[in-house]
Image (cartoon, coloured by chain):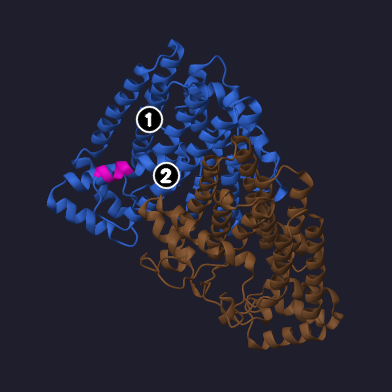
Chain colours: A brown, B blue
Amino acid sequence: VVKGPNSYQPALLNRYNQRIQQELFLSTQKHSRELRGPFLYHLGSADQNWNPLYGPNHSGKALRSALCLYAFHALNNCWEKALPAAIAIELLHNFSLIHDDIQDHDTERRHRKTLWTITGQPKALLTGSAMHAVAYLNLLDLNNRGINAEKVLMTSQLLFKTSLDMIKGQVLDLQFEQSVQIDRYRYLEMIDFKTGSLISCSLTVGALLGTDQKSTIKAFSQYGLHLGRVFQLRDDILGIWGQSNVTGKSTSNDILRKKKSFPIIYAIEECTPKDRKVLLRIYNKEALGKQDLDIVMEILERNRSKNKTEEFIKLEALSAIEQLNLMRIDHWALKEGKDLVEFLVSREY
Amino acid sequence: VVKGPNSYQPALLNRYNQRIQQELFLSTQKHSRELRGPFLYHLGSADQNWNPLYGPNHSGKALRSALCLYAFHALNNCWEKALPAAIAIELLHNFSLIHDDIQDHDTERRHRKTLWTITGQPKALLTGSAMHAVAYLNLLDLNNRGINAEKVLMTSQLLFKTSLDMIKGQVLDLQFEQSVQIDRYRYLEMIDFKTGSLISCSLTVGALLGTDQKSTIKAFSQYGLHLGRVFQLRDDILGIWGQSNVTGKSTSNDILRKKKSFPIIYAIEECTPKDRKVLLRIYNKEALGKQDLDIVMEILERNRSKNKTEEFIKLEALSAIEQLNLMRIDHWALKEGKDLVEFLVSREY
């Protein structure tokens, strides 16, 4: 992973990463040449000519698959059994990224050109849909690892539903783009669907495969929802105050992209009528320039939007840790779960 | 169904149609408002404001779901048990249509505006992906109808693989658009993936749910592959010589759209070097006009492309019937399977 200056990674992400990357690679090899190349490119294991990339690759953190393995591991002495589910989840996430980039016309992700800028939109659209199907196909390997058919069906159902929730979140996000009447609670609902659902699903699936105890499964699920909010709200901060050379996201600031993320919505809600008028006028423009950016940044500053978002993140982090404390898991698992929360609260990439 | 002047429908399509439309409608009702409207519009049960459409609707023939129910029915005294699979297949088909229309910028289907022209591309893309997930979700209802978990998993796997095959066919189709080096065998391979795979899968799934006899399942599967070719090659003929007010497809002729369908590929392969030069020059143009259309039609005429395509269809129809004769099924089922072949050979819409 190409990392920024602050390249600490918590144990929870480090332990499983290499195996996840291997398995992601293997999962692409079963498919036809036409799909394999674009799959590998997007996953960071091939270059623009679909030739293999050796050395430091450009994959993501693989947060979601690591969470799935972690939940299983926290309840058992091993984690390999949950790999097919973890890979399915990572592919589901990447399917949504491929289509997202097309929709948003984003040209850069993880310090590289997005897939559609290389293949054109129609082929990237097909590659994304193929990855959607491959995700589910991968899940069925659970059955070959000794998970019984009933549980595989339950897991499938959860994944299909999560896929729908993510899409619902994206539809809400599209609607928000055309609206200025968003309050922070509707925004949180949207990110729970768009981001939280899959992060929570990752942990739920790992727990579901690892135990039959309903209260434990539920605690992992809730831990995931709060973690999802921490993750997304920190993303919102990085999107405005982060450095794109570290985050690997598109070089243009979220404000220039007119994204109505939490700090903006908070400011619109809390600022003076005069500032609100200025903000709404700017957000109704077709495109924003450097001057607009400066004005918006000033209003955010005046309303302490960044601090307020950070306070909100800390509350969600506490709720996440509360759920961890409800679980009867080993000390190492408890510690790693907490470390991950801390990491997500303050990550720079 | 709004039908053309020749509105005969074979028993195999008529028997299950009403129930299929009901179940398709019900399958949409479980989902959130944001998805339900676009789903229903595309399926022909709602208007542009997502209000219900009564009276003659604009649904398709529901060929694929009918084939699934037919295969099950031919092997059992009932067919309701296979409904969740039939609906899943129909939704999978419609997912691919929604995305296809975006890719091809098609503005009309089944005598109506395509979904993306109403919602915009981003939302139509999301609606299609949601329908992809809903298709699989629907399949799991088989388990509630007494199909055991192992068989549901087998069926899921077949559906995921078919989804990938369809996408592979679409990728090949995209490649063909940019190439003039296509022979009829590569074209047939492409349509086997793009169209044949789902038609064959529909029958395979119905048979798989209805029996454990491998040879029977295989015969249904093969019947489906030949049926798929009959269906697609007839589509190719209608795309050039059909009347758009009957077919409900886009008003522009396949030639004007520069689609390299079977009759065109046949002509390029078989015509004189002089005609070939003319054809390739025309197909290299950015856009074709009325005069180009006339020239191409004349070359097709001179090479008897339509007749040759019809001959090819008849051979595939015979192969389909051969597979039917291998099955040990009741007389009514044999007759209806044959009637369907006859219908697809000569359909006008």
Q: Is residue A24 above or below residue A142?
A: below
Whether A286 is drawn above or below B29: the answer is below
Residue A268 in the image, given as x and y percentages of width and height? 80, 75
**Residue nearer the viewer, A48 or B109:** A48
Magenta region, residue range: B184-189
Which residue is pictured at 47% across the width and 23% down the height?
Answer: B8
Q: Dot 2, how many residues are within 10 Å of its Cα: few (below 14), some (14-19), or many (20+)?
A: many
Question: What is the number of the mark on residue B315?
Answer: none
Q: Main secondary structure of the magenta part?
A: helix
- Mark 2 or mark 1: name the one nearer the start of the chain: 2
Q: Is residue A43 left or right of residue B311?
A: right
| Residue B172, horizontal then vertical, whole percent | 35, 51
Q: Nearer the viewer, residue B98 or A311?
A: A311
Name the residue rendered at 40%, 56% in the picture. A36
Residue A62 falls within the magenta-colored stretch: no
For label 2, the residue is B165
In the rendered view, would you say B93 is above or below B335? below
Q: Amino acid at mark 1?
A: Leu
Distance, label 2 to label 1, CA atoms, is 17 Å
Residue A44 x %, y %: 47, 67
- The local secondary structure at tag 1 comes to helix
Would you name the residue on which mark 1 appears? B227
Which chain's residue wears label 2? B
